[in-house]
Amino acid sequence: MSDKNYDYGKCHVCGEQMIERQINQDLWVKGSLIVIENVPAGVCPQCGEKVVKADVGQQVAAIIAHSKHLQPTRSINVPVIAFKEVA
């Protein structure tokens, strides 16, 4: 689980100190969008860059690997807009 005292260090993009937040991680897996909620991550308050600890990354990978067998918490509708339609 998450260690609230974990030091994520400085952002590798802008140098600001990272802070821990709960994020939603969205991933495309074999053409399907999966959203994993409440993932502990270091988030840069200046530029928004996000990083996760190695053990959290391993847990996310395990969720993806077993996603066919897991019952979703809920489902969402996501609008899809082609780039050429708004350019």
Image (cartoon, rainbow, N blue to C red):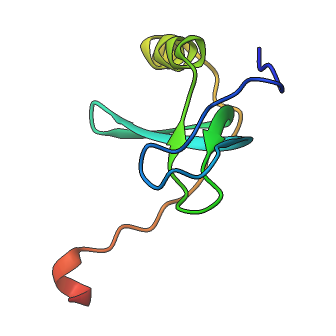
Q: Which residue lies furthest to the left in this view?
A: 84
The image quarter containing residue 52 is: top right
The image quarter containing residue 21 is: top right
Q: Kindly identify the residue that appears in the image at 22 percent across and 86 percent down.
A: 85
- 14 or 54, which is in the foreground? 14
Above-or-below relation of 12 to 76: above
Q: Kindly identify the residue that appears in the image at 63 percent across and 38 percent down.
A: 42
Q: Position of residue 79 (x, y in %)?
A: 44, 68
**Quadrant of the snapshot with the C terminus:** bottom left
Above-or-below relation of 50 to 87: above
Q: Kindly identify the residue that appears in the image at 77 percent across and 14 percent down.
A: 1
Compared across the picture, whether 28 is left or right of 22 comes to left
Tally of numbered tags: 0
Compared across the picture, whether 87 is left or right of 60 comes to left
The image quarter containing residue 83 is: bottom left
- 70 or 52, which is in the foreground? 52
Q: Position of residue 68 (x, y in %)?
A: 47, 17
Q: Position of residue 24 (x, y in %)?
A: 62, 44
Q: Kindly identify the residue that appears in the image at 66 percent across and 32 percent down.
A: 39
